[in-house]
């Protein structure tokens, strides 16, 4: 049975939620599921904006047919050609064989790469700044390459002032009936997941996200309609400000993320002592993550949130513990920058983890390595306790300054 919601004049949400998928992109845990948003405008012409993942295709087609109420579909705008949004295009073509597929040249190449159906006669190419009048509504197209893929574009409805933003402003999590961000307690229910979604999926492309925000800054936007997560119609500057910070790799808050790898609990002992000292000395937010038990996507997200990081690793096969090395390399691959970092190393012989972690940090942009070091020989001893005290003092001074 259909399940749709009205967003603004003639404009409906026709997407669907998947609460059964455990790993988004087969890598990111999504304990609260994922929403695949699609939007339908019923003007003199009818316009669908993107489709959905195949997993929710059946429900989606019911929604589209319900809103069309017997009318045909004139246009399908393809803002993003990733399969979680385009997997249902062929079904739409079978139902509405004369539908025009509005897309850019890069999208056309991807349609051919992913699928075998022939859409040549349906394709209508648009470029930056082109518009499409559908009656009262007039849609303007802006290219947004690498927010998240090269073919991405966003669509602005000049009539309703709704901006259809592809992956931008999306989040993990499903709707549970609450479509609009103002119907949720967004800061409690979604912000952490929105940050985890952005940082892990789009985080590498901060320059491109900043360019898009600048390009759109003159538009009056009353609705932000992303392809995942809640629709924004109130307090839009809240999410715009978050995106602006994330895109510039600026921390949201002063605080410390400690990511550690410990085999027998001795490195963990050191970071627990450090955490106690930091809190005693007045640091408001200290966050400890065992890389062996916490999925890396959460650690990457928290690293984007806070100003200071501590990496603590045992030496393992003359290298960094693999899961911590992976977190560091993932941060580097996400173009992560502008943070202050401290290093704790451990080993029973041939200690190398500190040197190797330092090399990765130094290969990233605008990273400040603090001087205080902690070098543990198997387990924390008196001299380490002093080193940890010095490290805590240096971090606190850096946060205050
Ligand atoms: Fe939700 Fe880049 O796809």
Image (spheres, helix red, strand yellow):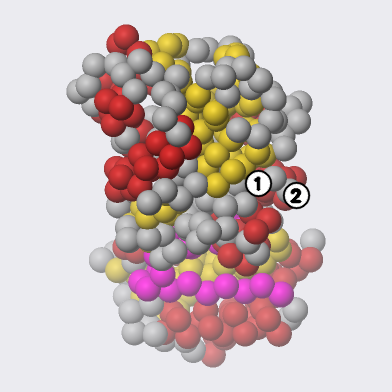
Residue bounds of the magenta highlight: 283-305
Q: Quadrant of the C terminus?
A: bottom right
Given the current orientation, which residue lies at the most extreme right position?
A: 401
Q: Is residue 361 left or right of residue 370?
A: left
In the depicted structure, whether residue 371 falls above or below residue 145:
below
Q: Where is 305 relative to 73, above or below?
A: below
Can you see residue 315?
yes
Which image quadrant is residue 382 in?
Answer: bottom right
Q: Residue at x 55, y 30 (%)?
A: 41
The 10 Å Cα crowd at callout 2, few under 14, some 14 to 19, many 20 or more, is few
The residue drawn where x is 38% and y is 51% is 1
As drawn, 62 above or below 154: below
The residue lying toward the viewer, choosing from 133 and 221, is 133
Q: Position of residue 218 (x, y in %)?
A: 76, 26
Q: Residue furthest left?
A: 116
Residue 57 in the magenta stretch? The answer is no
The question of residue 300 being in magenta is answered with yes
Image location (x, y in percent) of residue 156: 63, 26
The local secondary structure at tag 2 comes to: loop
From mark 1 to mark 2, how far is it between C-alphas?
8 Å
- State yes or no: discs 1 and 2 in contact (Cβ < 8 Å): yes
The answer to whether residue 169 of the structure is visible from this angle is no
Label annotation for residue 235:
2
Whether residue 182 is situated above or below residue 282 in the rendered picture: above
Residue 238 place in picture, x, y as percent: 72, 50
Q: Quadrant of residue 151?
A: top left
Tell which of 225 and 383 is nearer to you.
225
Residue found 46% across the figure and 32% down from its top: 68
Work out whether residue 304 or residue 322 is closer to the camera in this orientation and state it. Answer: 304
Give the residue number, with chain letter if any, for mark 1.
Answer: 232
């Amino acid at each position: 049975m259909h399940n749709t919601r009205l967003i603004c004049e003639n404009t409906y949400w026709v997407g669907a939620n998947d609460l059964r998928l455990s790993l988004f992109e087969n890598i990111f845990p999504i304990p609260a599921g994922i929403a695949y948003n699609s939007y339908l405008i019923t003007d003199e012409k009818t316009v669908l904006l993107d489709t959905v993942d195949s997993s929710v295709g059946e429900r989606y087609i019911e929604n589209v047919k319900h809103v069309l109420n017997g009318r045909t579909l004139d246009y399908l705008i393809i803002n993003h050609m990733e399969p979680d949004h385009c997997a249902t295009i062929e079904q739409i073509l079978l139902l509405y064989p004369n539908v025009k597929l509005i897309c850019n040249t890069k999208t056309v190449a991807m349609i051919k790469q992913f699928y075998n159906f022939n859409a040549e006669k349906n394709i209508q190419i648009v470029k930056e700044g082109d518009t499409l009048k559908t009656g009262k509504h007039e849609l303007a197209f802006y290219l947004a390459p690498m927010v998240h893929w090269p073919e991405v574009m966003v669509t602005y409805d000049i009539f309703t002032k709704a901006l259809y933003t592809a992956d931008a402003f999306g989040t993990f999590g499903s709707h549970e009936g609450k479509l609009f961000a103002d119907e949720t307690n967004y800061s409690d229910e979604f912000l952490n997941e929105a940050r985890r979604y952005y940082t892990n999926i789009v985080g590498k492309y901060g320059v491109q996200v900043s360019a898009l925000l600048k390009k759109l800054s003159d538009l009056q936007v009353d609705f932000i309609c992303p392809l995942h997560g809640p629709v924004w119609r109130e307090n839009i500057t809240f999410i715009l400000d978050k995106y602006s910070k994330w895109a510039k790799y600026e921390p949201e808050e002063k605080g410390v993320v400690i990511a550690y790898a410990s085999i027998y609990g001795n490195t963990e002992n050191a970071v627990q002592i450090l955490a106690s000292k930091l809190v005693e000395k007045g640091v408001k937010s200290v966050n400890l993550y065992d890389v062996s038990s916490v999925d890396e996507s959460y650690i990457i997200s928290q690293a984007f949130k806070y100003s200071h990081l501590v990496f603590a690793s045992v030496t393992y096969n003359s290298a960094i513990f693999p899961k911590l090395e992976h977190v560091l390399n993932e941060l580097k691959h996400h173009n992560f920058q502008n943070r202050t970092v401290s290093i704790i190393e451990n080993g029973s012989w041939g200690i190398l983890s500190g040197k190797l972690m330092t090399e990765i940090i130094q290969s990233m942009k605008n990273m400040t390595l603090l001087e205080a070091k902690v070098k543990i020989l198997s387990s924390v001893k008196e001299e380490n306790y002093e080193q940890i005290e010095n490290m805590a003092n240096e971090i606190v001074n850096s946060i205050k300054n």
